[in-house]
Image (tube, helix red, strand yellow):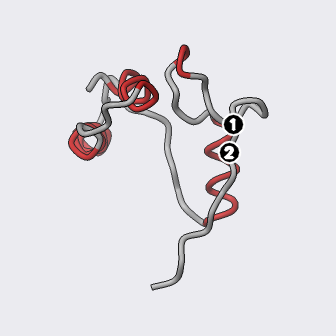
Amino acid sequence: MPAKKKVSLSVGRGEKLPVSKGAGLTAKGRAKYNRETGSNLKPPAPNPKTKEDEGRRKSFCARSQSWKGERGKAARKPWNC
């Protein structure tokens, strides 16, 4: 398995939101991450319109339930976890 590529994202460059505004990635941050890693990150799906979005929301909420820090709690908020 190839090593994961480390992508440097920063609040100051507008790639991440500060904790006070939700602590997730911005569109610019997702685009940079996708470009550099070949991933396909999508924006949060807080009010899912499709079954696929509902599955993404449930999956994110399940895997992030152990995030107890300030940034983790803020990142879960836009997903309505």
Q: Position of residue 42 (x, y in %)?
A: 49, 44
In the picture as drawn, the residue positioned furthest to the top comes out as 20
Q: Quadrant of the C terminus?
A: top left
In the picture as drawn, the residue positioned furthest to the right comes out as 13
- Residue at the spot x=23%, y=37% of the render? 65
Which kind of residue does numbered mark 2 sit on? Answer: Leu
- Residue 21 sits in quarter: top right
Q: Position of residue 59 (x, y in %)?
A: 25, 45
Q: Position of residue 27 (x, y in %)?
A: 64, 36
In the picture as drawn, the residue positioned furthest to the front comes out as 69
Q: Secondary structure at mark 1?
A: loop
Report the Cα–Cα distance between label 2 and label 1.
Answer: 6 Å
> Which mark is on residue 57?
none
Q: Secondary structure at mark 2?
A: loop
Give the labeled residue for mark 2: 9
Q: Position of residue 77 (x, y in %)?
A: 37, 21
Q: Is residue 68 above or below residue 4?
A: above
Label 2 vs 1, first from the N-terminus: 2
Position of 62 with respect to 5 (left or right) is left
Q: Quadrant of the N terminus?
A: bottom left
Q: Is residue 51 above or below residue 70?
A: below
Position of 36 with respect to 13 (left or right) is left
Position of 31 with respect to 1 (left or right) is right
In the picture as drawn, the residue positioned furthest to the bottom comes out as 1
- Residue 38 sits in quarter: bottom right
Q: How many marks?
A: 2
Which kind of residue does numbered mark 1 sit on? Answer: Glu
Give the labeled residue for mark 1: 15
Tell me, yes or no, whether the two marked residues, 2 and 1, touch with CB atoms within 8 Å.
Answer: yes
